[in-house]
Amino acid sequence: MAKGIRERLLEQAIKFHQWQEATYPGKTAEEIGGEWEVDYPYWNDTYSAFCHVLTQMDAETADSVLLDEMVYLIARDNEAEGFIQETTSHPKWFEYLCRRAAASNESEAKWQFAAYLPECPCRQEVKDMILDFAKDPNEYVSRRALLAMPALRPDCVEQFAPLFWERNCYSLELQEYQRIAVLVSLDAIHSGLLPQYLEQAKQDGRRYLLEHAERIEGGLL
């Protein structure tokens, strides 16, 4: 029975791969960009097969092919986030897939696992993976990890703050978002470092960063 459940999901994954190639020939997900996945016409069938795996199979029995395709489908569902939400309700599956995602190149899956780690009642060693996600070279993955860190490892937020604040490997726009994440995460843990970063935000002067600093000072966040 488990084989049939596995094969059903793999068939759905193949169907999506084929649709992607037919619709955007020769392009990777990163090259396509935008919200292209929402146009896929068979999401309901795919979601049903995915949920069937979560509820009818043990995560320990999953092979690398199945895990990779599940990570791929979670990544493609990055707008609705239905797959990751369902996975969060199955801690063992979440653990296996989180580890698989972390070792993959699927940034659209990584940020979802980082963001949903606080929601999943998984083991502490899995929750500690938030530190690895915070070091990910993808800007959005690292930012979502820092924003989730106060709920998982509040003791580590302050040590990541200067790294995010001074990081110059992104565009000015993305650097601003990194600095906003620093303010929000420091505020979440009521850090004693927050005042100095609020002052630095004022010196920085960029619009959205200033707006967040003002909201935090006004107690609105």
Image (cartoon, rainbow, N blue to C red):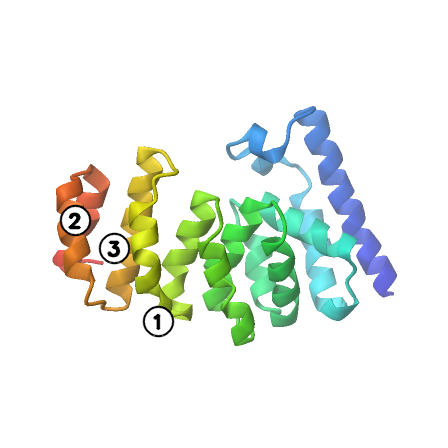
Disc 3, SS:
helix
Rendered location of residue 198, percent (x, y): 16, 53
Q: Which mark is residue 200?
A: 2
- Residue drawn at (29%, 54%), measured in percent from left and top? 162
At label 1, counting other C-alpha atoms closer than 10 Å, the crowd grade (few under 14, some 14-19, many 20 or more) is few
Amino acid found under the numbered disc labelled 1: Asp
Question: Mark 3 — residue?
Answer: 183
Amino acid found under the numbered disc labelled 2: Gln
Disc 2, SS:
helix
Which quadrant holds the N terminus? bottom right
Cα–Cα span, label 3 and label 2:
10 Å
> Relative to residue 124, is residue 97 drawn left or right?
right
Looking at the image, do the residues carrying marks 3 and 2 touch, with CB atoms under 8 Å apart? no
Rendered location of residue 137, percent (x, y): 48, 45
At label 2, counting other C-alpha atoms closer than 10 Å, the crowd grade (few under 14, some 14-19, many 20 or more) is some
Question: Mark 1 — residue?
Answer: 155
Looking at the image, do the residues carrying marks 3 and 1 touch, with CB atoms under 8 Å apart? no
Q: Nearer the viewer, mark 3 or mark 1?
A: 1
Amino acid found under the numbered disc labelled 3: Leu
Earlier sequence position, callout 3 versus callout 2:
3
Cα–Cα span, label 1 and label 2:
22 Å
Q: Nearer the viewer, mark 3 or mark 2?
A: 2
Which quadrant holds the C terminus? bottom left
